[in-house]
Amino acid sequence: MRKTTKGAVAVGAGVALLLGGAGTLAYWSDSKPLSSGTTISSGKLSIATKTPGSWAWANGTTTPAFVPGTSKVVPGDAVRYTEVFTVTALGSRLNAQSSFAVPTYSGSNALTTALGTPAVQLTAVKTGAGTGTITTGTNTFSISSPTTETTFDVTVTVTLTFDSATAGLSAQDLSAVLQNGAVTITQV
Amino acid sequence: MRHAPRLVAVAVVAFLLSGIATAAYAAWSASRPVASAATIRSGTFGLDARWVGTPAFTGMWPQDPRTGVVQLTHQGDGRWQYQLSVTGASLPGLTVTLLEATGPDVADCGTTVVTPGAWSTTRATGSTAYVCVRTTLGAGSAPGGSAAFTVQATARNQPST
């Protein structure tokens, strides 16, 4: 045999011995699946419209109905927008707090001045089952510990009152364009 | 250059802290618009005040009442109230009395006195009110006198409903 051939055989034998040696490193081993699968479930926090909003007179008799854009308001009149939302909360340690973006006017004139800043009121009531509790404040509410799914009815009202002290003939025959507001519930 | 590693360490720590702070503000939040967008329109207001016909307060003598009828018509929106006042009736013995009326004729004058300066009851939008103006000279009035008196009508709106 040529020397190179002998060398190759020797190297191959050495590798074989090493592999055989590696086999000697094996030792007992066992494996089991975890006894139970672990499912992580997320909670829920949502708000949806329950009853579409509508406008109505807020003082005096309610007829004829108030129709935005058509009915004419005069000093002393008050009109109100009412919308009901459903808030759903679920979370073992969830706490949430409401906030409200007050609607603003698009532009300004004597009528927007006479109507002033819209008066907003939020009221929240728990509906149905659920372990969550609700705490109401001045136009705010907070939810705590809804370990089971809990729903709340949140009623939002936006009231505009035409200042009865509007003097002379000011603010007549004008339009005030009110924009949308927003109600937000945020985890805290 | 000796401080370069420290600066890098500070920068890394600051970055990590900023990341932690950012994460601390992450929270669920749900929002819905309150569809309050609407156009609110204001109305108008006006008062039309006039005599019904031409009142004749001339050639009077004691205990001879003369009556004119004032017609007040609301213009615009909302409900309204009115009040009347009389000024300038300075002739001795002359009295001017305001009386409610149900219509434009003198025969429609009632006996209920309208108190000058007092607001009427609230009236319907666009309605018309009539008030009688009755002048009387007293028994002791001197002849040949005259006075120019003014009946001032003022109206104010009331809420629509």
Image: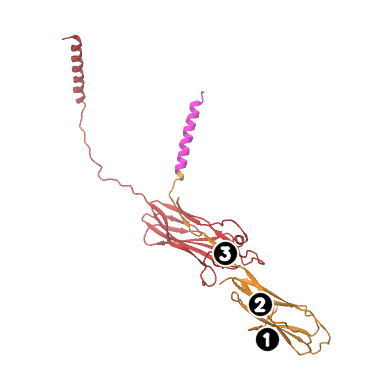
Q: Nearer the viewer, residue A134 or B146?
A: B146
Residue at 48 percent across and 26 percent down: it is B5
Please name the residue shown 63% across and 74% down the image. B74
The amino acid on which the numbered mark 2 sits, given as a three-letter code, is Leu
Task: Give the spatial CA distance, label 2 vs label 1.
Answer: 15 Å
Chain identifier for the orange-coloured part of the image: B
Type of amino acid at the residue the image marks with label 3 = Arg
Find residue B5 and name its label.
none
State if disc 2 and disc 3 touch (CB < 8 Å): no
- What residue sits right under mark 3 in the picture? B41
Instruction: Tell me which chain the residue with mark 3 is part of.
Output: B
In this view, which residue lies farthest toward the front?
B53
Q: Chain of mark 2?
A: B
Q: Which residue is mark 2?
A: B72
Camera-side residue of B48 and B113:
B48
Q: Determine crowd level at label 2: few under 14, some 14-19, many 20+ residues with C-alpha closer than 10 A.
A: many
Tell me, yes or no, whether the highlighted magenta stretch contains residue B94: no
Does residue B27 lie above or below A13 as drawn?
below
Query: Farthest left residue?
Result: A1
| Res B106 quadrant in image | bottom right
Q: Which residues are magenta?
A: B1-23
Percent of width and height locating residue B134: 72, 84
Dot 1: what SS? helix
Spot occupied by residue B55 in the image (x, y as percentages of width and height): 73, 83
Q: Secondary structure at mark 2?
A: strand
Residue at mark 3 to residue at mark 2: CA–CA distance: 26 Å
Q: Is residue A183 above or below residue A28?
A: below
Q: What percent of the width, then of the height, locates residue B37? A: 51, 59
Q: Are marks 1 and 3 in contact (CB under 8 Å)?
A: no
